Amino acid sequence: IGVGQTVTMGIVSALGRSRLGVNQFENFIQTDAAINPGNSGGALIDVNGNLVGINSVIFSQTGGSQGIGFSIPVSLARNVMEQLIRSGSVTRGWIGVEVRDVTADLAASFPMTVRRGALIANILRGGPADRAFVRPGDVLVGVNGQPVTDSTAMLNLIAELPPGREATLEILREQQQVALKVKVGKRPANVSG
């Protein structure tokens, strides 16, 4: 609008927001600080001036701020920046599985003691998960000690892992917790899930 630099103030409403339909990898900070067209890419800072995130998306039916904005966490932005500087591209980890959320209905239909995680629905033959003996029907509940709350969290956790490194998958299989080591692969460009 041609008024120069502006500063807005707000609070962080939530962390780890996903399923906004913006990107395949979503892990946003929700804020009520006004983010208007032209503000994307601006800094989300705390009261001490520390960078917390990069403003990127607004929820709006009119195109203007309605008090719901989303920022990319600085840790993710830094990871992407470092990869771009180092190699000119962003590489994401991948294990070759198709997953579903563990819903209440799904948990009730199986003898499950957990109500969170990512149900392994399908495995790419010969892929990293297949070589690590992950099976359809397993429920992925953790990656390297980080809890998996749903399929989106699982996708984000795996995507952040460097290809070629070993990761520990915490699996619930037939009511037993199993830890499997998987060598993380490089996410193919044509993969949608």
Image (spheres, rainbow, N blue to C red):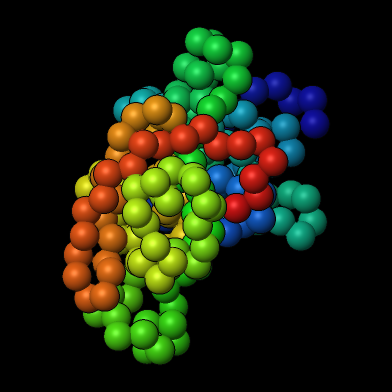
Give the quadrant of residue 102. bottom left
Q: Is residue 42 visible?
A: yes
- Of residues 82 and 7, the one nearer the viewer is 82
In the rendering, at what x and y percent does residue 120 appear? 44, 64
Residue ID at (61%, 48%): 24
* For residue 29, side relative to residue 22 (left or right): left
- Of residues 81 and 137, the one nearer the viewer is 137
In the rendering, at what x and y percent does residue 30 appear? 49, 51
Count the marks: how many? 0
* For residue 129, side relative to residue 114 (left or right): right
Residue ID at (35%, 66%): 139
* For residue 155, side relative to residue 132 (left or right): right
Q: Is residue 182 above or below residue 162?
A: below
Residue ID at (54%, 52%): 124
Give the quadrant of residue 187. top right
In the rendering, at what x and y percent does residue 116 appear? 34, 70
Q: Is residue 44 visible?
A: no
- Of residues 41 and 45, the one nearer the viewer is 41
In the rendering, at what x and y percent does residue 58 appear? 65, 49
Quadrant of the drawing holding the N terminus: top right
Residue ID at (61%, 36%): 188
Give the quadrant of residue 135. bottom left
